[in-house]
Image: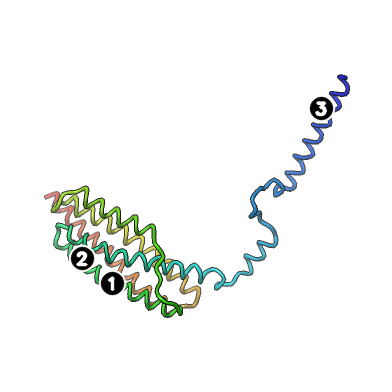
Amino acid sequence: MAKSTATKNDAAKSSAAFASKNDAANPSEKNLSKFSPTKEVEMDIQSLGTTDGLLKLFTASIKDIYWAENQLVKALPKMAKSAGSPKLAAAILKHLGETKEQVQRLENVFELLGRGPQAKKCDAMEGLTKEGEAVIEDTDQDTAARDLGIIMASQKVEHYEISSYMGLIKLSNILGLQEISAILSETLKEEENSDATLSSIADTIALDEKE
């Protein structure tokens, strides 16, 4: 009986060792993912053309930023009204006018893409505008704290837009959409200028507080 048990143990150890060796040689055998990489998949990726995925990504991103800009058109008037600094309020209202023009530019982009304007909810912009509203609720009117909070919230928005437009311009260039690239570049420049203006106003407010 003892000999029989020992034989079974030896057989089990031998089977386990073989399985371990086989797994090492074929690691994909233990990969439970249905998206296991294969030679065929790698070949498919290499054969993808720029219009197979990039145009779809570009169009979805345009819908996203179109929603974002329209959201800003609604949010900026409240930000301007809540600002204590006349310079800050004026800068926000100026950018409101630019944002309305940016919305029109994006509608032109849709036309160049051969489709009507369509918005896709931008969760990032929704969160950023809510953060701006929270700053107003948590600070007192006509204080440096509120103005600097509004500037911080506004610059987060600008930085999001700047990175979005930079990415869109790169995609449009890859796709050979030069006219669209020029339109988006105009908006990018406005976003960068607005960010610089907000930084300058913040420096002025900070200096006034120190004096």
Q: Quadrant of the N terminus?
A: top right
Answer whether labels 2 and 1 touch (C-beta < 8 Å).
Answer: no
Place of residue 184 in the rendered image (x, y in percent of width and height, measured from the top left): 38, 73
Residue at (30%, 57%) from the top-left corner? 129
Tell me the kind of residue under disc 2: Ala
Label 3: few (<14), some (14–19) or many (≥20) C-alpha neighbours in 10 Å: few
Answer whether labels 3 and 2 touch (C-beta < 8 Å).
Answer: no
Question: Does residue 200 sit above or below 118 in this rendering?
Answer: above
Place of residue 162 in the rendered image (x, y in percent of width and height, measured from the top left): 36, 64
Label 1: few (<14), some (14–19) or many (≥20) C-alpha neighbours in 10 Å: some
Residue at (76%, 41%) from the top-left corner? 21
Task: Tell me the element at label 3.
Answer: helix
User: Which residue position holds label 3?
Assistant: 9
User: Which residue position holds label 1?
Assistant: 100
**Side (left or right) of 188 relative to 33:** left
First in residue order: circle 3 vs circle 1: 3
**Side (left or right) of 61 relative to 39:** left
Place of residue 52 in the rendered image (x, y in percent of width and height, measured from the top left): 57, 71
The CA span between labels 3 and 1 is 78 Å
From the image, state whether disc 3 or disc 2 is nearer to you: 3
Question: Does residue 180 sit above or below 211 in this rendering?
Answer: below
Residue at (31%, 64%) from the top-left corner? 71
Label 2: few (<14), some (14–19) or many (≥20) C-alpha neighbours in 10 Å: some
Q: Nearer the viewer, residue 103 or 173?
A: 103
Residue at (63%, 66%) from the top-left corner? 46
Tell me the kind of residue under disc 3: Asn
From the image, state whether disc 2 or disc 1 is nearer to you: 1
First in residue order: circle 3 vs circle 2: 3
Tell me the kind of residue under disc 1: Lys
